[in-house]
Amino acid sequence: MSVARTLLGFDFGMKNIGIAVGQELTATANPLTAIKARDGIPDWSQIEKLLKEWQPDLLIVGLPLNMDGTEQEMTAAAKRFGNRLNGRFNIPVEWQDERLTTYEALDQMGIRSKMDSRQRSDVDQLSAQLILQSWLNQQ
């Protein structure tokens, strides 16, 4: 019998990083928080605190791709972020295609753009949840 793992999902952004938590046992993901980033670099102590609190077995990082599946500038930045997560905290990282998750999050919130949201971090958290949920759904 396999052990049900706890997962953290990340919606990487240059200014904000959305974070969600999920469980393989229930195959569900929930928004957790969003943290600020400066040019894609987070306050690593905030991430470390979350990792200590949730003790995840696996980290899922959204991979921003062009609609045709090719990589873009943000793809490399998200990969660097995921590789740094793995290097700093020695927790395995897997990637999840995140095309359209921000649009889906905005649609679920009933707003047209992140600028319309009073709490832009809500969009980032929900995007992280959608990324993590799509990963869980594919398992």
Image (tube, rainbow, N blue to C red):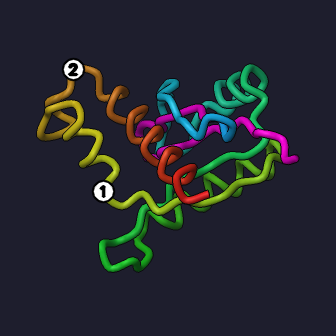
Q: For mark 1, give the secondary structure.
A: loop
Of the pair 72 and 64, the residue shown nearer to us: 64
Classed neighbour count for the residue bearing mark 2: other residues with Cα under 10 Å, few (<14), some (14–19), many (≥20): few
Q: Nearer the viewer, residue 43 or 121?
A: 121
How crowded is the residue under tag 1: few (<14 C-alpha within 10 Å), some, or many (20+)?
A: some
- Kindly report the distance in space between the C-alpha atoms of the residues bearing marks 1 and 2: 21 Å
Question: Identity of the amino acid at label 1?
Answer: Leu
Q: Residue at x 22, y 30 (%)?
A: 109
Q: Which of 100 and 137 is in front in this view?
A: 137
User: Measured from the top left, where is residue 8 in percent x and y?
Assistant: 63, 38
Q: Residue 116 carries which label?
A: none
- Quarter of the image with the C terminus is bottom right
The answer to whether residue 7 is magenta is yes
Residue 125 falls in image quadrant? top left
Q: Which of the two marks, 1 or 2, is nearer to us in this view?
A: 1
Q: What stretch of residues is rendered in magenta?
A: 1-22
State the mark number for residue 100.
1
Q: Nearer the viewer, residue 52 or 131?
A: 131
Q: Which residue is drawn at 71% across and 51% down?
A: 84
Identify which amino acid the numbered label 2 is placed on: Arg
- Judged from the image, the secondary structure of the residue bearing numbered disc 2 is loop
The residue sitting at the right extreme is 1
Find disc 2 in the rendering and name its residue.
Answer: 118
**Seen from this angle, which residue lies furthest front?**
1
Above or below residue 128? Residue 138 is: below
